[in-house]
Image: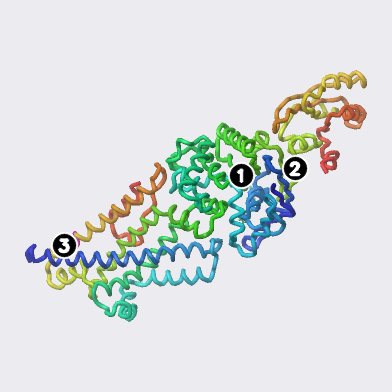
Amino acid sequence: MITTSGLTKVYRSRGRDVTALDGVDLHVREGEVYGVIGQSGAGKSSLIRCVNLLERPTSGTVTVDGQDLTALAGRGPRAGKELRQARSRIGMVFQHFNLLSSRTVQDNVELPLEILGKSGKERSRKALGLLDLVGLADKAKAYPAQLSGGQKQRVGIARALAGDPKVLLSDEATSALDPETTRSILQLLRDLNQQLGLTVLLITHEMDVVKAVCDSAALMEKGRIVESGTVSELLATPGSELAAALFPVSGERTGADRTVLDVTFHGEAATQPVISQLSRTYNIDISILGAAIDTVGGLQIGRMRLELPGRYEDNVVPIGFLREQGLQIDVVGQEAVLVKEGAK
Amino acid sequence: MTWSEMQPLLSQACSETFDMVFWSTLIAVAAGLPLGLLLVLTDRGGLLQNIVANKVIGQIVNVGRSLPFIILMVALMSFTRWVTGTTIGTAAAVVPLAIGGIPFFARLVETSVREVDHGLVEAVQAMGGNTWTIVRKVLVPESLPSLIAGTTTTVIALIGYSAMAGTVGGGGLGDLAVRYGYQRFETELMWITVAVLAVAISLIQFAGDFAARALHSRGGRSGPAPKLRLLKAKEPDAAGVGKAA
Ligand SMILES: Nc1ncnc2c1ncn2[C@@H]1O[C@H](COP(=O)(O)OP(=O)(O)OP(=O)(O)O)[C@@H](O)[C@H]1O
Ligand SMILES: [Mg+2]
């Protein structure tokens, strides 16, 4: 649904070049919620703003719903008619809501419809329907200043949906909200995604957001995507930073001469027999440092942190045994060596 | 001088001042608004970025703003004659007043429009709006309270200028005060004129302030009301009114 290839963005300010995007290849499938996460300055906003060409990429292409937007953009800095039409089919919500304070809630939602040249009757019917959808039917005549942050963002979402977009872009839509409100807004996005088949690309710096709603995720660092995939793919990728962050297991190593393993299992995969088998077969004492079961992106995932006596070199055989049982094993502290090539 | 002698003089002067200020404000606002918008739009990073045009408009506005009104009036004599066929009378006074008012108002518009959150512009761009849509639906409506405050300031400034224009044949209250108060020592009439001006200015200030605040606090928005930009901070009450929010 959204594809970027070789996307680069270089800002030139006061003679200094800042490379905000450095060859980003992103692929968001139709109907999924895709989260891009990264630290401040990683280039997340630049990326999402390049998707609807609010920011002109320095090079690379952006395709949304089969349409090459970079080709529509033309050379000049101003957006031509075709690009503007394409934009009207892409909804966008903002961290600071960006509602017009001079208009009522309903008039804010009607604005995209005015731009599309819809009649007054059609506009108000559509706007009231959307306000109902986001649960704000009773606030149609209120002004944005009279609303709470969460309500403002609901209006922002209703407004973004006014042009019947297939794609919704969200730049830190929940970052200005408290945790409770964040959850309800994320739930709304999830519902819209499921009810309307809306494809959502969202930018965030909070792992909880990804965990709550995303089907797929990408990790950005210094203008590049360093990891990406569906949540289950990421969790199945040994040493994935995203997977570890999405689903952390705690537990500290008890001594220097020990090997710590993170065992990941999906669904009902039974690990207990495997572990007792391991213990019996190799005659080693295994201690469980930590374990948890969680739902990530709608999948049940279990993780367990085990400690085996002896260094890594002494445990190659037992680890091989566990892997043979179809379990995903990450050796804690060994990432640097093993993992990165595993991720490739 | 009795009241029955003064009354017709005063009412004529009032209507002359009103004519001068009304028409010159109308022209200053009609021309200053697009000019002020252009100053913002053509600036670096603006929607119609054009540095050359921006510098040219900026320079013209600066010169117009910094020229003392009395000099502008004299300098524009031949232009005034070309437009109105005369250089004296109320209609002739409207020309330099309007031309003095345009850059004055344009700068106020520029400052007001610059304060509009850029996020709103982006939101409308993301919806597929063009520059004209952004001007009509975002920049002007969102800065309206502040534009009204700017109009009030302009009206008051033009009342001041109109007194000067009046003395060279435009008539009006300023002219009346000078002719009777200064030249014929009719201090009573002069003080009445001063009182009329003071009341008029206060009323305009009050009405403008009220309108700006009513629009601004639409929907109970808290936060500072737009400041009245009194470049000529002569009116003692006006500064207080601006802060009273
Ligand atoms: N308009 C601009 N001009 C110059 N540099 C910019 C501009 N916008 C962004 N940058 C730079 O590009 C880099 C990426 O910025 P970007 O806003 O995309 O990061 P981000 O991941 O969204 O960060 P945050 O989480 O803080 O929003 C930063 O180094 C930033 O300073
Ligand atoms: Mg950002």
Q: Is residue A216 left or right of residue B94?
A: right
Q: Is residue B192 magenta?
A: yes
Gap in Å between the C-alphas at discs 3 and 2? Answer: 81 Å
Residue A327 x, y percent position in the rendering: 84, 29
Q: Is residue A151 left or right of residue B103?
A: right
Q: Is residue A238 magenta?
A: no
Dot 2 lies on which element? strand
Give the crowd class for mark 3: few <14, some 14-19, many >=20 residues within 10 Å: few
Q: Which image quarter: residue B48?
A: bottom right
Residue A116 x, y percent position in the rendering: 53, 53
The magenta region covers B190-195
Task: Say which of A304 and A328 sits in front.
Answer: A328
**Amino acid type assigned to the residue bearing label 2 in the image:** Ser
Dot 3 lies on which element? helix
| Residue occupied by mark 3 | B191
Instruction: Point out the frontmost of discs 3 and 1.
Output: 1
Give the crowd class for mark 1: few <14, some 14-19, many >=20 residues within 10 Å: many
Q: Chain of mark 3?
A: B
- Residue A115, placed above or below residue B94: above
| Residue occupied by mark 1 | A170
| Res. A228 mark | 2
- The response on whether ligand 1 sits within 8 Å of label 2 is no
Q: Which image quarter: residue A245?
A: top right
Q: Residue at x 50, y 68 (%)?
A: B54
Q: Chain of mark 2?
A: A
Q: How many marks?
A: 3
